Image (cartoon, rainbow, N blue to C red):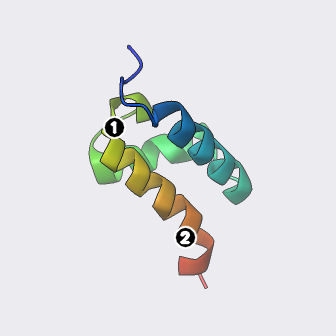
């Protein structure tokens, strides 16, 4: 699998890594979410918009669970 070419990819992946860690998510939990909502198994397959939306979901997750 090749790395996407959009400029913000590395930044967005880094931020999603931090958010997944903050939430205590495993790679499997992240993969399950991607499959359920995007039909894709990896962040490498997401468009910039999808990856940005995934990051926003992670950032808001603890607030949504209240």
Q: Is residue 42 above or below residue 51?
A: above
Alpha carbon separation for disc pair 2 and 1: 19 Å
Quadrant housing the C terminus:
bottom right
- The residue depicted at 50 percent of the width and 54 percent of the height is 55
User: Residue 34: where, in percent of width, then height?
Assistant: 39, 45
Q: Secondary structure at mark 1?
A: loop
- Direction bottom: furthest residue: 66
Quadrant housing the N terminus:
top left
Q: Would you say 14 lies left or right of 51 here?
A: right
- Direction top: furthest residue: 2
Q: Secondary structure at mark 2?
A: helix
In the rendered image, which residue does mark 1 sit on? 46
- The residue depicted at 42 percent of the width and 19 percent of the height is 3
Dot 1: within a 10 Å radius of its alpha carbon, few (fewer than 14), some, or many (20 or more) residues?
some
Dot 2: within a 10 Å radius of its alpha carbon, few (fewer than 14), some, or many (20 or more) residues?
few
Which circle marks residue 59 in the picture? none
User: Residue 18: where, in percent of width, then height?
Assistant: 68, 47
- The residue depicted at 44 percent of the width and 46 percent of the height is 32
Q: Would you say 56 lies left or right of 25 here?
A: left
Assess whether mark 1 and mark 2 are in contact (beta carbons under 8 angstroms). no
- The residue depicted at 54 percent of the width and 70 percent of the height is 60
Total marks placed: 2
In the image shown, does 15 or 66 lie closer to the viewer?
A: 15
User: Residue 2: where, in percent of width, then height?
Assistant: 38, 14
In the rendered image, which residue does mark 2 sit on? 60
User: Residue 36: where, in percent of width, then height?
Assistant: 33, 51
């Amino acid at each position: 699998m090749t790395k996407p070419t959009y400029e913000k990819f590395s930044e967005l992946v880094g931020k999603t890594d931090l958010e997944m860690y903050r939430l205590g998510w495993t790679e499997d939990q992240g993969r399950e979410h991607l499959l359920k909502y995007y039909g894709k198994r990896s962040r490498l397959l997401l468009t910039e918009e999808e990856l940005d939306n995934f990051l926003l979901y992670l950032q808001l997750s603890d607030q949504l669970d209240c």
